[in-house]
Amino acid sequence: MFSPSQSPKPLTKKLLVRGKNKTIGVLALQGDFLEHLQTLRKIGVQTLEVRLPQDLEKVDSLIMPGGESTTIANLMDVFKLRKPLVERIKKGMPVWGTCAGMILLAKKLVQERPTPLGVMDITVNRNAFGRQIDSFETELEIKGLAKPMHATFIRAPQIVSSGAEVEVLSNLSDGTIVAAREKNMLVTSFHPELTKDTRLHEYFVGF
Ligand code: GLN
C-alpha cells in the first residue's frame, strides 16, 4: 500500500466530480434510499444513511428519497429528526428531495397530510397525476443538462405554485413544473435514481 502522497491517483472521471470529498447523506427511513446510495457510490462519493439526528451531524448534504411522504414524516418525528433537519437546511445544507422528498420540503401542501418541513417556497399537490396506474416515463429537458433525461414519474407530486426565489429547472410540455431549485434546495417530481443517468446526482454533489 502506498500513502496518498506517494501515489497520486490517476485522473479518472470519478475524481473530476466536484465535491467528491463531501459525505452525502441519504434519509433512510422508508422509500427508495438504496437506489440513491447506489447512484452516489457509482459516481465515487462518500455516503451515509441518515436515520438519527447524530447521523445528520456527520453529513455535508442530504437526499430525501421517494416513498410514502406520510410514513417518512411520521418516522422523522419518531426519530426526532424534524427540528435538526429544518435547522441544517435553513443554515444552508444542500438538500435534494425526489418525489416524496419534494413533498416534505414544501412550505405548503394542497392536502392536509403530512405536515411538511416547510422550508422551500413551493406549494405541492400530492399524487397529482392520478393513481398508481397513471405512473409514466418521459424524456425531460432540464436546465443545466446538455441532453434530455429519461424521467420516471410514480404517483408523482406537482408544484402548483412557487415563490419568486424559486428557479424552475424543468417543465412538462403542458407547463407543469417538475424540477426546481431555491438556493440550497433542489426538488424533482421524478426519480433519477431509478435510471442509469447520474447527471443530476453529479449536479447536486457539486452544490
Ligand atoms: N405519492 C407519494 C406520496 O404522496 C409519493 C410517491 C413517490 O415518492 N414516488 O408520498
Image: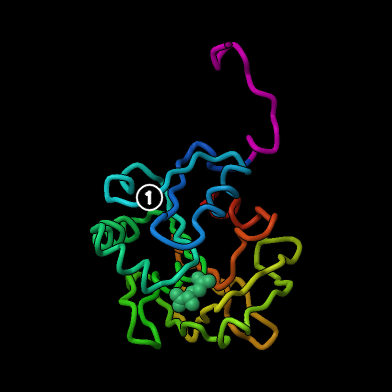
Q: Secondary structure at mark 1?
A: strand
For the residue marked with disc 1, what is the amino acid? Val
Point out residue 19 in the picture as x, y percentages from the top left corner.
Answer: 53, 42
Reply above or below: 168 against 39.
Answer: below
Q: Which residue is mark 1?
A: 50
Specify the quadrant that holds the N terminus.
Answer: top right
- Percent x, y of residue 131: 56, 86
Q: Residue drawn 50% across and 36% down?
A: 21
Q: Residue at x 61, y 74 (%)?
A: 153
Could you say which quadrant of the image residue 41 lies in?
top right
Residue 167 forms part of the magenta stretch: no
Q: Residue furthest front?
A: 133
State yes or no: residue 10 in magenta: yes
Left/right placement of residue 32 relative to residue 69 reads: right
Write the start and end of the magenta stretch as one range: 1-16
Say which of 20 and 50 sits in front. Answer: 50
Query: 70 or 87, which lies in front?
Result: 70
Examine the rendered structure and indicate whether residue 166 appears above or below residue 26: below
Q: Residues within 10 Å of mark 1 (few under 14, many from 20)?
A: many
Residue 194 is situated, as x and y percent measured from the top left of the image, at: 63, 60
Residue at image coords 33%, 45%: 55
**Taking the image as drawn, is residue 180 in sight?**
no
Residue drawn where x is 63% and y is 35% of the image: 15
